[in-house]
């Protein structure tokens, strides 16, 4: 199958691939810029670029400053090529401020999930930015499109459907995750298309979850999707932001090492059973102090560990204390490779 370009609003990529925003600092400027240069949609994950050992006021300003810098670095690295965008989780306490940074820095698109991105069009205003909500059910899609059309007369420019086999936080109940066939991407697509038809929305729909090869992409295009979002497979790209020791944890892991935990974000989260996770599953309360409350949905007094601290440990290669979020297709992650190598397999 010949893979067609992906067109979202006024943006086009050579291949129908969006690189997933992956925090903390996995989806950084280097990875996003290289994806843009190779022919995909490159996405910076907005979370966690600033220092975290500072007060709440400093934390917001520092996060905004560092995100702006990361966007500028990415633009420089890809020589201002498009489409370069940012992923902003709704659960972030700095959600509005980060959207405003994206407007000021003129990114091409914003991908937003981990909650329903209801106020996104208001924060973006009339800036020329493609808005791409991430949803995991037709019901969630309907809530978003109804709100956007009534309040802002705005439609999504594309829609990402995250299935139950994705890495990281999952918009599903535990029973659905245990029986992924009930909410599989082939079932979610017609349900979402039905909502789109009712609201007269004709935009690309992208599949996310368990995609790591040209064959996987072709499978989802044949199913009726317009493209895909890929996360886990890009974690061990040379250009991805985390330390080599952490990339090796992903490479050495197998499907049997995966476990679902309840994350401090308040959602189920697919991770590897690394030392931190083993301790938490055994009932450990990891010591931390939280001066900044980075997630609106986290209760630091009840959370067994600080997810920001754990993801920064992953970034720095601290395997004992890191949290290793990953998708079901961890077995496809076998090496550290240049991003271009993957995109070359998509050429005819
Ligand atoms: C390590 C990791 C970090 C992630 N970070 C984010 C994030 O910051 N924001 C977000 O919306 N989704 C995040 N996700 C979810 C991805 O954006 C994506 O939808 C998902 O990983 C796709 O499935 P795949 O990993 O099987 O390719 C993350 C996933 C992983 C594996």
Image: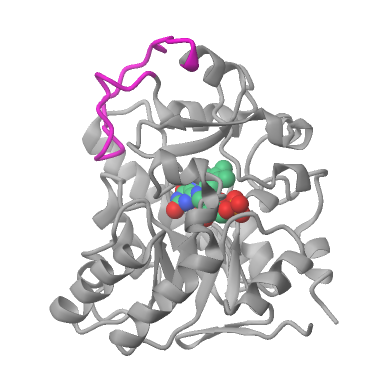
In the foreground, 332 or 188: 188
Q: Quadrant of the N terminus?
A: bottom right
Is there any visible trace of residue 23 in the rendered image?
A: no
Residue at the spot 74% in from the left edge and 34% down from the top edge: 254
The quadrant in which the C terminus is found is bottom right
17 up-or-down from 303: above or below: below
Q: What type of secondary structure mainly makes up the magenta span?
A: loop
Q: What stretch is highlighted in magenta?
A: 281-304
Residue toward you, 234 or 261: 261
**Picture coordinates of residue 287 (x, y %)?**
38, 11
Q: Is residue 302 magenta?
A: yes
Q: Position of 256 compared to 294: left or right?
A: right
* Residue 294 pos. (x, y %): 31, 37
Q: Position of residue 216 (x, y in %)?
A: 72, 65
> Compared with residue 174, is residue 89 higher up or lower down, i.e. above or below?
below
Q: Residue at x 51, y 40 (%)?
A: 178
Above or below, comparing residue 58 to residue 300 in the picture: below
Total tally of numbered discs in the picture: 0
- In percent of the image, x 75 and y 59: which residue is there? 339
Task: Work out whether residue 25 or residue 211 is closer to the camera in this orientation and state it.
Answer: 211
Q: Can residue 114 be seen in this view?
A: yes
Q: Quadrant of residue 13?
A: bottom right
Q: Is 32 situated left or right of 252 in this image?
A: left
Residue 78, relative to residue 201: is it above or below? above
Q: Horizontal placement of 32 versus 129: left or right?
A: right
Colour approach in the figure: one colour
Residue 63's spot in the image, x, y percent?
36, 45
């Amino acid at each position: 199958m010949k893979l067609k370009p992906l067109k979202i609003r006024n943006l086009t990529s050579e291949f129908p691939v969006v690189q997933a925003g992956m925090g903390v600092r996995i989806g950084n400027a280097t990875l996003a810029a290289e994806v843009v240069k190779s022919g995909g949609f490159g996405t910076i994950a907005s979370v966690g670029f600033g220092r975290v050992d500072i007060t709440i006021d400093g934390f917001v300003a520092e996060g905004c400053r560092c995100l702006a810098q990361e966007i500028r670095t990415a633009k420089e690295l890809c020589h201002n090529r498009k489409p370069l965008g940012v992923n902003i989780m709704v659960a972030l306490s700095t959600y509005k401020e980060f959207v405003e940074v994206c407007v000021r820095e003129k990114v091409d698109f914003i991908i937003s999930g981990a909650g329903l991105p209801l106020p996104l069009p208001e924060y973006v205003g009339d800036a020329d930015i493609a808005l791409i909500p991430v949803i995991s059910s037709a019901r969630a899609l309907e809530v978003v499109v109804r709100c956007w059309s009534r309040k802002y007369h705005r439609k999504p420019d594309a829609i990402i459907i995250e299935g139950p086999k994705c890495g990281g936080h999952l918009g599903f109940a535990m029973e659905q995750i245990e029986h992924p066939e009930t909410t599989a991407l082939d079932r979610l697509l017609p349900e979402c298309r039905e909502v789109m038809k009712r609201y007269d929305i004709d935009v690309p729909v992208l599949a996310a979850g368990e995609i790591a090869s040209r064959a996987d992409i072709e499978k989802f295009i044949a199913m009726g999707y317009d493209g895909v979002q890929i996360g886990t497979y890009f974690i061990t790209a040379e250009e991805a932001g985390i330390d080599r020791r952490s990339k090796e944890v992903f490479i050495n892991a197998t499907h049997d090492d995966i476990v679902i935990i309840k994350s401090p974000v308040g959602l189920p989260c697919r991770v590897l059973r690394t030392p931190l996770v083993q301790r938490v599953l055994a009932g450990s309360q990891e010591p931390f102090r939280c001066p900044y409350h980075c997630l609106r949905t986290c209760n630091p007094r009840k959370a067994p560990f600080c997810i920001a601290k754990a993801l920064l440990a992953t970034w720095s290669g601290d395997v004992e204390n890191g949290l290793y979020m990953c998708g079901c297709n961890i077995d496809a992650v076998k090496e550290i490779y240049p991003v271009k190598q993957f995109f070359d397999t998509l050429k005819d």
